[in-house]
Image (cartoon, rainbow, N blue to C red):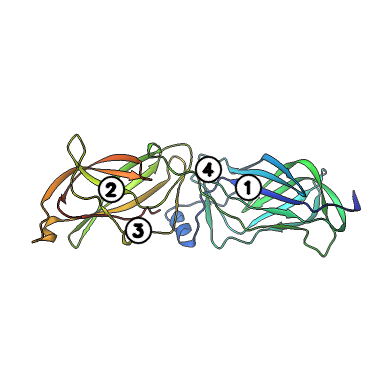
Amino acid sequence: MKHTRKVDFVVTTLALVVSVGLVPSQAQAQSSLAGTHLVTCTSRDLRAAISATTTLPGGTMYAVSLTNSNVKSKGCTVSGGLTAQFLASTSTTVATPASSPSLTDTRVLRPTFAAHASVATMQGVLCTTQQATSLRLSLADATRVVQLPEPIEVCVDAGTEWTSVSGLTLPYPAPCAIASLRTTLRRDATNAGVRYFRIVFTNVTRNACTLQGTPRVQAVIGASHRAVGPPAAATRRLGWSGGPVNLAARTGRAHSVFGATMPSHYAPLPCTAARATGLVVTLRRTQRVLIPASLIVCTKMVSTKIGPISP
C-alpha cells in the first residue's frame, strides 16, 4: 500500500561481504584468469545473509554477506555492477532498482573473498512511500534476496532517483601466515650468467589470504642454517608490482623470482664462493621458512636478488 508522508532522511548502507577472488587492476584480473575456464557466477554459487545491523541517527546500516559457497569450484566470474532492488512483503518491487558503476573488466570470485558496496535510500522530503521488507541483490548471473531486520519506508515517486548504489570496492583477505603456506623452490632458467628460480607460495588452508611486497631471502649453510653471504637484493625488475596478491583457499598460488649470479661472472672481484644448502624466506619481517636448495653464492658481495610477490 502506498501513502504520502514526510520522513526523516535515511541512508541504508550495505557492507557486502562477497567471497571473491577479485583483483585491483585489469592486468591482475587477466593474470588470474589465464589458463582457467571459469563460468559466470549464478545463484547456485552465492549465499546472502545479513550479519549485523547498526542504527544511527537518520539512518540504518546493514552488514550483508554474499558468499561464494561453491567450495568445490575454482571460482566463478563477474562483470558489470551490483544491482539492488527493494521488495515489499508480497515480493513486488518497491521503487526502481539502482546499480553501481560497472567493473572495467571481468573478475574472479573465489570462496572466502570479500567485496563491499553501499546502497543509499534518500528521504526527508514530501514523497509517496511504500514499505520494503527485503532487498534483492544481483551480481553477474546471481540474484539473491535478503530480508531486512525491520521494514523501512522507501520513496517511490517517479522522476527522482531515490536509491543509489556506490561503486563496488574490493578489499583483501587477511595476510597469509607462513604456516598456512607451502613454500617451494622451482628452477626456471639461466640467462646472462644468472640462474633464475621461482619461490612458489601455495595456500593450503581453508581460508583465502593475501601476500604483498618482497620477501627477504638469505642463503644458509649446514644444519644450523648459518647465513652465507649477504641477503638477496630486492628489485622490482624481477616481478609484478601491482599491489596485494589474493590466494584462494586450498589452491591459491603466488611467486617471487629469485636470481643467483654465477661467481665466475664477478671475476676478478673478490667473490669467495660457497655452496649454500638452503634459503631462509622471511615474510612480513618475522615469519620464516627454510627451503632446501643447493646453489653457489658469493660470501664477500651480494650475488643474489629477489623480486616482489606476483600472481
Work out how far the residue at label 3 is from the one at label 4, CA to CA, in angstroms.
26 Å
- Residue 307: image quadrant is bottom left
Count of all numbered marks drawn on residues in the image? 4
Separation of disc 2 and disc 3 at Cα?
15 Å
| Callout 3 crowding tier (Cα within 10 Å): few <14, some 14–19, many ≥20 | some
- Residue under circle 3? 239
Q: Is residue 75 rendered to the left or right of residue 34?
A: right
Which is more toward the observer, 156 or 171? 171
Name which of mark 2 and mark 3 comes first in the sequence: 2
Q: On screen, 296 above or below 205?
A: below
State which tag comes first along the sequence, 4 or 1.
1
- As shown in the figure, which amino acid type bears the numbered disc 2? Val
Which residue has dot 1 on it? 16
Question: Mark 4: which secondary structure?
Answer: loop
What residue is pinned by disc 2?
Answer: 217
Mark 4 is on which residue type? Pro
**Which mark is first along the chain, 4 or 3?**
4
Mark closer to the observer (4, 1):
1
Q: Earlier in the sequence, mark 4 or mark 2?
A: 4
Give the CA distance from mark 1 to mark 3.
Answer: 32 Å
